[in-house]
């Protein structure tokens, strides 16, 4: 059982106030949830609790990475500066066929978890193969995760017979459903790598088990052409025609959307996760985030995997997202810092199926991070907008997930990070020789 924790002498994240924070506050945590918070004036901590003196650091909700392929840390920087389809077909798919094993997924996911925790991410939506091993790694590291097992219509790691793709994921869901901090889910790779029959069966599986359904959608302008023979029209309209869009569908990337596509997504209740740095690196395009938000679509923020980013720091992703959309619209207020902060915290958590979201309020899950503001690049600190435009993952001092202190003063407490780095380094040597 997690020990009760009290954080004192903190700035408390409050994005609905002008500055976005309240100075000199405390947070009490017990049984995995926030039990009290308020002003330090006349506050006396209860006895027999673990006290963390924030010393003026900012306490805020942990960040939510809405899309990642965690095990792809092995392929970080392996194939840079390439178009998406060349990158996938000539480099990533062949490398996955050769090097993705249960051991690789386990250790590379642990390495990704270290990177995410150390940069303030407390919840991640992962999507890959051998996802049992990813789920095991997340549980052991103490992260909150939505682990989505991949479905694709050709032989894949752990699923050599494509005819077994949906059944494999069904067994995965049954093994992990009900696990603390972990939600199993379905990841249908894309409309062009899955047949219409596979997509429908995958969505039926997600509905039957009441779990999220993830799919890469409209990532490139060429995707409609890749669907030739299946559908004449946009990829979004294709998903709509198959009845795949609903409140538990998460469309990842969603770059090439027109107004009717946005209207279809909004009317269905489906959500979108945008991955701006990955889309920029692969020159896939810029998602219409401002238009999606204006239409009432739930939008979250993701890093994508290390092979196409190449890091998992959501602070950098927030900065990129806000600035990119200002340039796209030639409007400095197109996507504001507070919009992006919400995408990376409460809104991101809710679109992944966590009804409570994350935040600083009594009764919410105690997924919180401490940001060290005593830094030259964060001085002065007029408002939390500066988190988006100046902060980085290295400014995260401590991390609490589900009431458990997972990182204290930059040291991860739940597992051996050096061991994960050493194991992945050994695998990297084999990739280099190939």
Image: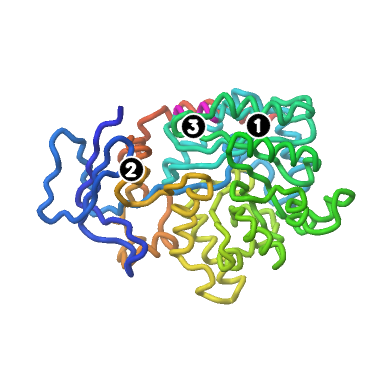
How would you rate the neighbour count of disc 2 (Cα within 10 Å): few for under 14, some for 14-19, many for 20 or more?
Answer: many
Q: Which quadrant of the figure has residue 327?
A: bottom right
Which element is circle 3 on?
A: helix
Report x, y in % for residue 163.
79, 28
Asked whether, in this view, residue 183 is left or right of residue 244, the answer is left
Circle 3/circle 2 CB separation < 8 Å: no
Where the N terminus falls, by quadrant? top left
Residue 86 vs residue 318, the one in the foreground: 318
Mainly helix, strand or loop, the magenta region? helix
Residue 44 vs residue 262, the one in the foreground: 262
- Mark whose residue sits in front, 1 or 2: 1
Work out how far the residue at label 1 is from the one at label 2, CA to CA, in angstroms. Answer: 31 Å
Bounds of the magenta segment: 135-140
Work out how far the residue at label 3 is from the one at label 2, CA to CA, in angstroms. Answer: 18 Å
Residue 333 magenta-highlighted: no
* Res. 240 in view: yes
Which element is circle 1 on?
A: loop
Q: Residue at image x 67%, y 64%?
A: 263
Work out how far the residue at label 1 is from the one at label 3, CA to CA, in angstroms. Answer: 14 Å
Q: Which residue is mark 1?
A: 129
Q: Which residue is mark 3?
A: 138
1 or 3: tag closer to the N-terminus: 1
* Res. 275 in view: no
Q: Which quadrant of the figure has residue 285?
A: bottom right
């Amino acid at each position: 059982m997690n020990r009760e924790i009290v954080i004192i002498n903190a700035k408390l994240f409050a994005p609905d106030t002008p500055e976005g924070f309240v100075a000199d506050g405390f947070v009490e945590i017990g049984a995995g949830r926030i039990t009290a918070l308020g002003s330090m004036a006349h506050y006396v901590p209860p006895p027999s609790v673990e006290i963390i003196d924030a010393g003026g650091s900012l306490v805020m909700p942990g960040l939510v990475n809405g899309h990642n392929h965690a095990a792809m840390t092995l392929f970080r920087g392996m194939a840079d500066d390439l178009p998406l389809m060349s990158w996938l077909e000539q480099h990533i798919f062949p490398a996955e066929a050769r090097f993705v094993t249960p051991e690789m997924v386990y250790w590379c996911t642990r390495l990704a978890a270290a990177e995410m925790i150390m940069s303030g991410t407390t919840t991640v939506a992962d999507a890959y193969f051998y996802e049992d091993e990813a789920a095991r790694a997340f549980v052991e590291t103490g992260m909150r995760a939505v682990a989505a097992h991949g479905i694709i219509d050709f032989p894949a790691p752990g699923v050599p017979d494509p005819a077994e793709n949906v059944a494999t994921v069904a067994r995965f869901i049954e093994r992990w459903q009900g696990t603390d901090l972990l939600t199993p889910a379905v990841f249908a790779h894309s409309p062009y790598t899955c047949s219409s029959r596979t997509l429908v069966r995958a969505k039926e599986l997600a509905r039957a088990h009441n779990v999220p359904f993830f799919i890469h959608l409209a990532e490139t302008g060429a995707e409609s052409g890749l669907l030739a023979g299946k559908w004449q029209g946009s990829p979004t309209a294709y998903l709509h025609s198959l009845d795949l869009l609903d409140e538990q569908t998460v469309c990842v990337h969603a770059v090439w959307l027109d107004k009717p596509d946005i209207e279809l997504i909004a009317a269905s209740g489906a959500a979108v996760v945008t991955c701006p740095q990955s889309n920029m690196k692969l020159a896939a395009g810029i998602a219409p985030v401002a238009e999606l938000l204006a239409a009432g679509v739930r939008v979250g923020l993701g890093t994508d995997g290390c092979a196409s980013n190449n890091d998992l720091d959501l602070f950098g992703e927030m900065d990129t997202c806000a600035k990119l959309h200002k340039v796209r619209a030639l409007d400095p207020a197109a996507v504001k810092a507070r919009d992006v902060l919400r995408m990376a915290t409460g809104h991101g958590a809710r679109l992944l199926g966590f009804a409570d979201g994350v935040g600083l309020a009594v009764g919410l899950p105690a997924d919180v991070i401490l940001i060290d503001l005593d830094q030259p690049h964060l001085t002065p600190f007029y408002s939390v907008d500066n988190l988006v435009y100046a902060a980085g993952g290295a400014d995260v001092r401590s991390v609490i997930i589900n009431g458990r202190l997972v990182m204290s003063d930059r040291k991860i407490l739940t597992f051996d990070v050096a061991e994960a780095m050493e194991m992945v380094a050994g695998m990297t040597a084999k990739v280099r020789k190939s």
